[in-house]
């Protein structure tokens, strides 16, 4: 039993933690068992992320192969499932280069930061009922805050590499990142308002109807915004191979490169998990008490597949198109969504908490989304039509010109 | 001493050393880029302090705004100007600055230590702690349970605690500064736009 | 009895005309500018009717208080502690008569103006100014508060400025307007000083339950304590106050040292001159003295000054009138002279006689001016040297001019005779007073001169041969290579003026004939007209709360003397200027034989030269201004420079601190904050506990 | 962890920030130092909120959040300040090719 003389802990609610703690405390001092239990949980999480990232990389490569009408990695292990391990070992054995003019400390810290922020994000995600490491009451905000740490890491990578392409990539990536932060946050506000909480667990429980239906606009915006923040096609200008080699991680090799890749795929995994939590009802499903983790996993894989599908379908956008999309389409849409949700929550008697009310909101929001998205898309298409802006006067917002000193 | 308090003290000292060290680095390091990274370190340490002081919302906001936005802005500004590597030079006011900073520090320390603070009574501590921790939520049933277990909750207090939240304060008694800050932000937005606009383009 | 609103509407009808004309008709409906004239005439006609009603009401107010002023509530305008500034109406016999005169004469002049100004492009502006002028005069007459009166007083000045300079593109007109404004202002300063003095006496007034700016209260305050008055105003102070008021009156009425603006004011349109000279501006001065007559009466010094200045002005202006060739200028001097008569009468206590003369003078002088305008209309010039022989072309004008002239000269039985005779008689009755003796002599000589210049004017204008009018004058000026005279048009069409001009002239002429009986019959023998004897004088006298004017009865001797003197003057004029039909055109001025005197007179006693060259240019510019300039440059500037230098030097020292570096400032800021903090830590303990 | 210790830490941070603000020549460095000062102040506010009983705590527990509310305001104002400050820095750099504060003496005249 968790004894009070070791103090209250945020992990108290976590059944896994309690299990380990109770087991350990039977023959160890409480502080030590506390430490052990925490460490075990963290180990599980870190490994889950890294292994998940590996699995996703395999899955995506396979999927892309199918989309490309080819087979994809299939040599190592059944269906090529061990391909990621092989890649990892290959990268591990390669030389770990640091460019001559690099800022060594910053350069080395980048992969750590990147993986760190991904792992930190997992802390608040409820994989099943009461299975979040920490069901923070500011969970959504926490997620956004930690994900914004990536921006610093990006810049560190770009700057410390002492490479023009890396810097370009970083500048592009950060510009995209901080721009898309705005519509993403605004779109999540609708979800938070209906749920009445920023705690992810509460949000899952509040989903009488999956929020993908209640907040279709928010789902669309969040998906697009997160694609951009993860530097995924069609928003992957930060590492556009045909333009700036590999962007901010041009100079990274060996294990550092492996970590960066792991962080990228881990990011996809975490974001997919978050989308599952926020919009797809999380662990909800038949026998959620026992099979919650399964539903959660299935939904997450579905979202990852969706990401891969998007990646396989769309060509890369120009940076100015990306910026224009953010400020001219996503921001207005997120404001429309916010305003609509506010009014609905305000006028519905229980602030949208009951099933009936959420169905009412579905009835309003779904047509709204179906009208608004194509409408703004049409507007955007007209803006982005080639030749619509004179070539010499092309304005590229968000991309600073780098001084050549 | 409770285990929790020991953990708190250790974390506090670690954070203090980290924050002060990083802050010293910010003002002393010559490489501006490293200075910004150290500044981000200060911000993160500060977020840690906030968690320690049961201001979770502030901690998250601190990370989101300071680390995620302000540091990035600083980096952008540094990149757009020259002389990053050797940019953080001291000016001629070195000696008076050291002198005055030290004097101010001494005065502040004197004030901090000599003042008889009107500390929160022990009875109310748990309630305050919970109200602050749960500052963004209406208190969850579990939290109220904790409160009641601590025996610090009368019926009236329970009502208050259920209602206590940053948002209620912001929309309630502090609504005027809140609105003023909103206007300030709008003005800053427009001002920033006007300033960043290249000259010659109307 | 008229209600307050009715009396106010006498004032506000022309104000409304002014506002409508200037704000609506002139900006938007200028094509229908005739409207503005008709509107003003309509307003004035109604106001005239209301004025008659007011006159009748005041006369008939109460059997016991016949002629007493009607009481109206006053409205507080500003409350300045002990001094309350109020606005209100004062409707006593003097006001009532002035209302009738102003509205009546103004009405006639406006009708006349319809014809006279018909072709002027600024027709509506003219009528706007005229409305303002009339309104200001009515407000002046109606004011119960001296400050209110002063405001309207200055408005009269402003309106006259605008009207004299109506043709502002003529330099002479602009200069004349400025001159009128400035010269009358000199007098106004005296008036203003008197008001300020009264204002400073406000506490004493309030102690006696009076209001320092309320006109009836001022009357009461001036009464000596012995007679039951309060005696607040007495002695030297009273003399100075009355002299100040008289200075204002002298400025407006063109009394001796300040008369120079009046002849120049002839640059305005002729109907304006008529209005200024008959009913409004110059009458304002006489009215002002009459308004404060109970106060003036309490100080013999001022009365003497008023009498002597009036007498001297009457004489001097008449002498200058002898030699003028401009028909309007002759009349201008005649006006000054006649105002001198009124002032002299006031100065010798003949309140009724003076105002009676003001009344009659308004009619015949307006008539004369309108005749002059009519003559100008035909001949294109005002210069009498280029007129002559107009009698046949303009018989009606001639007849009316003759009536006006005879009335001015004072020939039985025209209006002027009765009023002038009463003045002379009043002065004669005071003959124990040496000032009265001198005044009497001046006035009698004035009668002679008046007769002479009046008939010189009539002979030069209407008799003899026509001498070419404006055409000829322009031609002569061209030949002599002189600058072209202003106000002369080359269009000569010798014909009678249109009916719209003649009708008001005829109306005024009728009054010039009968006003004497109607207003102030010396005996009530005429059976048909049941007007009481000495009606107006008694009526006015009863309006006076505190003073008792003398009412002389008719004296055949005086009438005889004045008539004989006047006839002598007419005869002289006939001897010198009468030319038979067909006699050679003669431009030689008979009076030029007395060369130095003529020169002196044509140069108006060199007064303009004295004022402008000596006083303004030499004494003021080179003397006073030079001294003040020196003081300003060396003393004031030196002090300012010293002061500035001190701060500049100290500033330069402090400038060293202003490096422009924010951090430098920040350092000082922190230093200051530290000082405060440390001071609080050391000394602030007591505050906290 | 006591209130005094927290206040002293924040005082040290404030002093460091002050030193940086006064003694650095690069505008961006000065702005960074300013941010340190802001953070020090925030730390003080939150620490006081945690330990010191505000007025009316007995009446309403919500008053314990006053310090945090102030911190929220400080963060907001700091964000606005930094956005404008960096905008000004960029404008300054555009005009003078320099971000050296000791070169920026336009305030002198």
Image: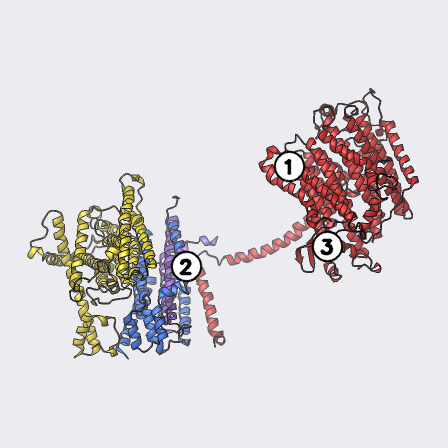
Chain colours: A yellow, B blue, C red, D purple
Rendered image: mark on residue B20: none
On screen, C576 above or below D61?
above
Residue nearest the viewer, comparing C43 with B127: C43
Q: Residue C651, image x and y in percent?
A: 54, 57
Quickly name the residue at label 3: C213
Is label 2 in contact with label 3 (beta carbons under 8 Å)?
no
Q: Residue at x 74, y 32 (%)?
A: C503
CA separation in Å, label 1 and label 3: 35 Å
On screen, residue C352 above or below B69: above
Quick one: SS at disc 3? loop
Residue B179 image label: 2
Q: Earlier in the sequence, mark 1 or mark 3?
A: 1
Mark number displayed over residue C125 = 1
Q: Chain of mark 3?
A: C
> Residue C553 or C289: which is nearer the viewer?
C553
Task: Bin the neighbour count of mark 1 within 10 Å (Cα to Cα): few under 14, some 14-19, many 20 and up.
Answer: many
Q: Chain of mark 2?
A: B
Q: Alpha carbon of mark 2 to alpha carbon of mark 3: how far?
A: 56 Å
Residue C256 in the image: x percent, y percent?
80, 42
Asked whether residue C511 appears in the rendered view, the answer is yes
Residue A304, picture quadrant: bottom left
């Amino acid at each position: 039993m968790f004894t009070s003389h070791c103090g209250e802990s945020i992990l108290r609610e976590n059944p896994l933690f309690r299990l380990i703690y109770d087991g350990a405390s039977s023959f160890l001092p409480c502080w030590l068992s506390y430490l052990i239990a925490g460490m075990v949980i963290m180990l599980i999480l870190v490994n889950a992320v890294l292994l998940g990232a590996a699995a996703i990389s395999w899955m995506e490569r396979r999927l892309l192969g199918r989309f490309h009408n080819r087979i994809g990695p299939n040599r190592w292990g059944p269906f090529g499932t061990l391909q990621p391990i092989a890649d990892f070992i290959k990268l591990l054995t390669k030389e770990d280069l640091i460019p001559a003019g690099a800022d060594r400390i910053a350069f080395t810290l980048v992969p750590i930061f990147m993986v760190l922020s991904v792992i930190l994000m997992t802390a608040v995600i409820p994989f099943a009922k009461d299975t979040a490491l920490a069901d923070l009451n500011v969970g959504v905000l926490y997620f956004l805050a930690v994900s914004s740490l990536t921006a610093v890491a990006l810049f560190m990578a770009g700057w410390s590499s002492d490479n023009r392409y890396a810097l370009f990539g970083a500048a592009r990536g950060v510009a995209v990142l901080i721009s898309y932060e705005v519509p993403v946050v605004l779109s999540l506000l609708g979800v938070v308002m209906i749920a009445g909480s920023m705690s992810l667990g509460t949000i899952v429980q509040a989903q009488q109807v999956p929020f993908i239906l209640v907040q279709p606009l928010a789902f669309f915006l969040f998906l697009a915004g997160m694609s951009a923040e993860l530097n995924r096609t069609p928003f992957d200008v930060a590492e556009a191979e045909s333009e700036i080699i590999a962007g901010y991680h041009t100079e990274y090799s060996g294990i550092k490169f492996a970590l960066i890749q792991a962080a990228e795929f881990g990011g996809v995994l975490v974001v997919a998990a978050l989308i599952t939590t926020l919009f797809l009802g999380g662990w909800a499903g038949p026998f959620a008490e026992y099979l919650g983790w399964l539903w959660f996993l299935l939904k997450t894989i579905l979202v990852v597949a969706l990401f891969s599908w998007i990646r396989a379908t769309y060509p890369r956008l120009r940076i100015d198109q990306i910026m224009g999309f953010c400020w001219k389409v996503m921001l207005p849409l997120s404001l429309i969504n916010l305003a609509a949700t506010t009014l609905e929550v305000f006028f519905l008697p229980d602030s949208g908490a009951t099933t009936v009310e959420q169905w009412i909101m579905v009835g309003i929001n779904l047509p709204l989304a179906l009208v608004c998205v194509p409408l703004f898309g049409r507007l955007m298409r007209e803006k982005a039509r080639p030749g619509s802006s004179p070539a010499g006067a092309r304005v590229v917002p968000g991309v600073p010109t780098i001084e050549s000193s | 001493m409770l285990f929790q308090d020991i953990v708190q003290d250790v974390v506090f000292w670690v954070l203090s050393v980290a924050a002060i060290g990083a802050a010293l680095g910010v003002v002393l390091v010559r490489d501006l880029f490293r200075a910004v990274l150290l500044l981000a370190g200060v911000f993160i340490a500060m977020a840690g302090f906030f968690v320690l002081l049961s201001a979770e919302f502030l901690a998250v906001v601190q990370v989101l705004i300071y680390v995620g936005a302000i540091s990035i802005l600083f980096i952008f500004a540094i990149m757009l100007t020259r002389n990053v590597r050797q940019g953080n030079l001291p000016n001629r006011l070195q000696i008076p600055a050291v002198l005055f900073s030290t004097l101010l520090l001494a005065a502040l320390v004197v004030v901090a230590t000599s003042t008889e603070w009107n500390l929160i009574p022990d009875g109310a501590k748990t309630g305050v702690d919970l109200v602050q921790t749960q500052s963004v939520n209406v208190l969850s049933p579990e939290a109220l349970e904790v409160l009641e277990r601590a025996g610090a909750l009368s019926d009236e207090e329970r009502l208050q605690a259920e209602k206590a939240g940053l948002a209620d304060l912001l929309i309630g008694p502090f609504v005027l500064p809140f609105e003023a800050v909103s206007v300030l932000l709008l003005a800053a937005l427009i001002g920033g736009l006007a300033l960043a606009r290249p000259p010659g383009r109307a | 009895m008229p209600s307050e609103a009715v009396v106010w509407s006498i004032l506000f009808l022309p104000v409304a005309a002014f506002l409508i004309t200037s704000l609506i008709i002139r900006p938007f409906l200028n094509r229908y500018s005739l409207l503005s004239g008709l509107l003003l005439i309509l307003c004035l006609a109604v106001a005239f009717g209301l004025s008659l009603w007011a006159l009748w009401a005041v006369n008939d107010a109460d059997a016991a208080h016949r002629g007493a002023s009607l009481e109206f509530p006053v409205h507080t305008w500003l409350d300045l502690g002990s001094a309350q500034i109020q606005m209100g109406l004062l409707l006593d016999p003097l006001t009532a008569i002035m209302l009738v005169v102003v509205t009546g004469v103004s009405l006639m002049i406006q009708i006349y103006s319809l014809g006279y100004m018909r072709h002027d492009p600024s027709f509506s502006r003219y009528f706007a100014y005229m409305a303002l002028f009339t309104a200001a005069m009515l407000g002046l007459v109606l004011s119960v508060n001296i400050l209110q009166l002063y405001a309207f007083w200055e408005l009269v000045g402003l309106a006259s400025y605008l009207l004299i300079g109506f043709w502002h593109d003529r330099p002479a007109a602009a200069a004349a307007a400025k001159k009128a404004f400035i010269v009358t202002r000199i007098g106004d300063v005296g008036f203003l000083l008197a008001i300020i003095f009264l204002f400073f006496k406000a506490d004493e007034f309030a102690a006696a339950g009076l209001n320092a700016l309320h006109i009836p209260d001022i009357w009461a305050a001036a009464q000596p304590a012995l007679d039951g008055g309060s005696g607040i105003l007495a002695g030297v102070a009273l003399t100075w106050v009355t002299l100040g008021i008289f200075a204002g009156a002298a400025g407006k009425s063109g009394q001796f040292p300040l008369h120079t603006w009046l002849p120049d004011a002839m640059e305005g349109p002729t109907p304006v001159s008529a209005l200024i000279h008959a009913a409004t501006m110059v009458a304002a001065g006489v009215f002002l003295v009459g308004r404060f007559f109970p106060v003036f009466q309490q100080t013999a010094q001022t009365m003497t000054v008023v009498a002597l200045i009036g007498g001297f002005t009457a004489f001097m202006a008449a002498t200058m009138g002898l030699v003028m060739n401009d028909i309007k200028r002759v009349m201008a001097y005649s006006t000054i002279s006649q105002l001198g008569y009124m002032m002299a009468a006031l100065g010798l206590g003949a309140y009724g006689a003076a105002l009676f003369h003001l009344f009659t003078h308004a009619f015949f002088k307006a008539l004369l001016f309108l005749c002059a305008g009519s003559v100008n209309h035909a001949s294109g010039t005002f210069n009498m040297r280029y007129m002559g022989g107009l009698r046949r072309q303009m018989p009606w004008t001639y007849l009316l001019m003759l009536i006006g002239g005879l009335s001015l000269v004072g020939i039985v039985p025209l209006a002027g005779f009765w009023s002038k005779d009463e003045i002379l008689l009043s002065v004669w009755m005071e003959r124990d007073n040496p000032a009265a003796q001198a005044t009497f002599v001046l006035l009698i000589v004035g009668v002679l001169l008046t007769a002479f210049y009046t008939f010189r004017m009539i002979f030069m204008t209407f008799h003899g041969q026509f001498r070419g009018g404006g055409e000829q004058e322009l031609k002569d000026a061209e030949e002599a290579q002189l600058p072209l005279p202003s106000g002369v048009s080359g269009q000569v069409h010798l014909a009678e003026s249109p009916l719209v001009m003649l009708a008001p002239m005829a109306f005024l002429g009728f009054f010039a004939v009968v006003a004497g009986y109607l207003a102030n019959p010396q005996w009530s023998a005429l059976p048909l007209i049941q007007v009481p004897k000495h009606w107006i004088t008694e009526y006015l006298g009863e309006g006076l709360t505190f003073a008792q004017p003398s009412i002389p009865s008719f004296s055949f001797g005086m009438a005889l003397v004045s008539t004989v003197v006047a006839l002598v003057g007419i005869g002289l004029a006939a001897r010198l200027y009468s030319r038979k039909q067909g006699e050679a055109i003669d431009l030689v001025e008979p009076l030029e034989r007395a060369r130095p005197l003529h020169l002196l007179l044509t140069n108006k006693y060199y007064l303009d030269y004295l004022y402008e060259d000596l006083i303004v240019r030499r004494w003021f510019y080179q003397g006073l201004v030079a001294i003040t300039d020196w003081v300003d440059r060396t003393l004031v500037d030196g002090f300012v420079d010293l002061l500035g230098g001190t701060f500049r030097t100290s500033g330069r020292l402090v400038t060293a601190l202003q490096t422009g570096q924010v951090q430098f400032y920040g350092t000082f800021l922190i230093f200051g904050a530290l000082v405060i903090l440390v001071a609080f830590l050391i000394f602030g303990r007591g505050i906290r506990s | 962890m006591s209130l005094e210790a927290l206040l002293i830490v924040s005082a040290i941070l404030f002093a460091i920030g002050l030193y940086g603000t006064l003694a650095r020549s690069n505008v961006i460095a000065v702005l960074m130092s300013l941010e340190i000062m802001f953070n020090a102040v925030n730390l003080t506010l939150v620490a006081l909120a945690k330990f010191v009983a505000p007025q009316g705590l007995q009446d309403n527990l919500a008053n314990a959040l006053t310090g945090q509310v102030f911190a929220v305001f400080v963060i907001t104002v700091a964000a606005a300040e930094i956005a404008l400050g960096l905008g000004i820095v960029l404008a300054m750099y555009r005009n003078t090719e320099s971000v050296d504060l000791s070169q920026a003496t336009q305030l002198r005249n």
